[in-house]
Amino acid sequence: AAGVIQSPRHLIKEKRETATLKCYPIPRHDTVYWYQQGPGQDPQFLISFYEKMQSDKGSIPDRFSAQQFSDYHSELNMSSLELGDSALYFCASSLDGPYEQYFGPGTRLTVT
Amino acid sequence: DAKTTQPNSMESNEEEPVHLPCNHSTISGTDYIHWYRQLPSQGPEYVIHGLTSNVNNRMASLAIAEDRKSSTLILHRATLRDAAVYYCIRKTGANNLFFGTGTRLTVIP
């Protein structure tokens, strides 16, 4: 079965640069979520989209923005990168409602 | 965020049952209880979820207390591949998941 696809899998950027992470949800899933997991930490919810509209916002810095496109894929844009942004970024998708979320393999972002 | 309380770590012998407890004493009537696990270097993986009744699937069973203030995830026969951090999550009206600290399960061969 198709899973959530994230690209790139690894990304190295320097401080103050920008980065774009992409997420392709499972077909027919209408909701996409972004999570950040710092080293040794638990995943933290950043933002979610339902039917291309932002549905909820967590601890996402103002330097980050995201959107969901007409084909339901989503992009997380990160600007003015800081060392503390180094983390694993997971995308998940689901059907809208109290249903399970399916996570992608993550993008490991390293900021130097 | 929606609070749950879990032990930081647990150990189990291989091929024995494991009972992972979770307290969610402030749960409301419409909150679902979800369990996810995260294996090393992987994204979280859905395990099971329920509302009021006990639930079974191919991975595990979920036993929910009658007052819904606690639940227990049951792995019927632990294998080495079950070693992971297990998260109990109270899923509120918002669809996003709030991960707590979780329980790190070690399976001893």
Image (spheres, coloured by chain):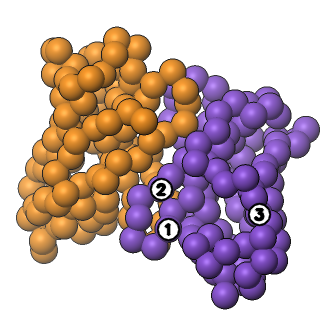
Chain colours: A purple, B orange
Q: Is residue A36 left or right of residue B71?
A: right
Quickly name the residue at label 1. Answer: A38
Quickly name the residue at label 3. Answer: A78
Q: Secondary structure at mark 3?
A: strand
- Circle 3: residue type: Met
Which quarter of the picture shows residue B96? top right
Q: Is residue B83 left or right of residue B9?
A: right
- Identify the subunit bearing mark 1: A
Spatial distance from mark 3 to mark 2, Cα to Cα? 18 Å
Sequence order check, earlier mark of 3 and 2: 2
Along the line of sight, the residue nearer the viewer: A64 or A53: A64
Task: Determine whether A59 is above or below B80 in the image.
Answer: above
Res A29 visible: no
Task: Determine whether A70 is above or below B82 in the image.
Answer: above
**Mark 3 vs 1: CB contact within 8 A:** no
The 10 Å Cα crowd at callout 3, few under 14, some 14 to 19, many 20 or more, is many
Q: Secondary structure at mark 2?
A: loop
Number of marks in the rendered image: 3
Q: Secondary structure at mark 1?
A: loop
- Circle 1: residue type: Gly
- Circle 2: residue type: Pro
The 10 Å Cα crowd at callout 1, few under 14, some 14 to 19, many 20 or more, is some
Question: Where residue B49 appears, x then y in whole percent?
Answer: 37, 31
Which quarter of the picture shows residue B71? top left
* Residue shown at 75% from the left, 85% from the top: A14
- Identify the subunit bearing mark 2: A
> Residue placed farthest to the top in the image?
B29
> Residue placed farthest to the right in the image?
A70
Res B41 visible: yes
Question: Where residue B46 appears, x then y in whole percent?
Answer: 44, 45
Question: Where residue A21 appears, x then y in whole percent?
Answer: 76, 63
